[in-house]
Image: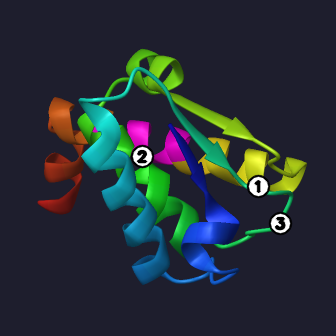
Amino acid sequence: MIINLKKECKYQTITREEGNKINKLINRAWDRENKIIIDFGNILIASVSFIDEAFGKLAFEYSKNILKKKLGFKNMLDYDKALLNDILTSRYRQKDLDQNGASRLHNSD
């Protein structure tokens, strides 16, 4: 399955609401598709909110290995690749801290 951001978002790739739309498409296809390809269409997203909502939230549900196997990205500009990697790294770190209780300990100081 291919999710085309130009088609689905009509170049509106800034807000969390638009990112949530993509996240829902991914979640609906997750169990019935072997691979989900996100086609960025060489448009610059450059929005932390959009990318976090669309893809970052998946890090709370799936391991790195599962995401790598299930999701593919094409026609993605280098800036957005770096942003996606930063967001996923941050979300996995946040998930690890929460599972280890570190974030709860830190908040109780």
Instruction: Name the residue rendered at 39%, 70% in the picture.
Output: 21
The image position of residue 45, as x and y in percent, is 73, 69
Q: Circle 3 sits in a helix, a strand or a loop, which is it? A: loop
Q: Amino acid at mark 3?
A: Ile
The image position of residue 108, as x and y in percent, is 11, 60
Kindly identify which residue carries mark 1. Answer: 80
Instruction: Name the residue rendered at 41%, 37% in the picture.
Output: 92
The image position of residue 15, as x and y in percent, is 52, 83
Q: Circle 1 sits in a helix, a strand or a loop, which is it? A: helix
Instruction: In this rendered view, identify the residue nearer to me: 105 or 12.
Output: 12
Q: Quadrant of residue 94?
A: top left
Q: How is the image coloured?
A: rainbow
Q: Is residue 65 above or below residue 53?
A: above
Q: Earlier in the sequence, mark 3 or mark 2?
A: 3
Kindly identify which residue carries mark 3. Answer: 43
Q: Circle 2 sits in a helix, a strand or a loop, which is it? A: helix
Residue 91's disc is 2
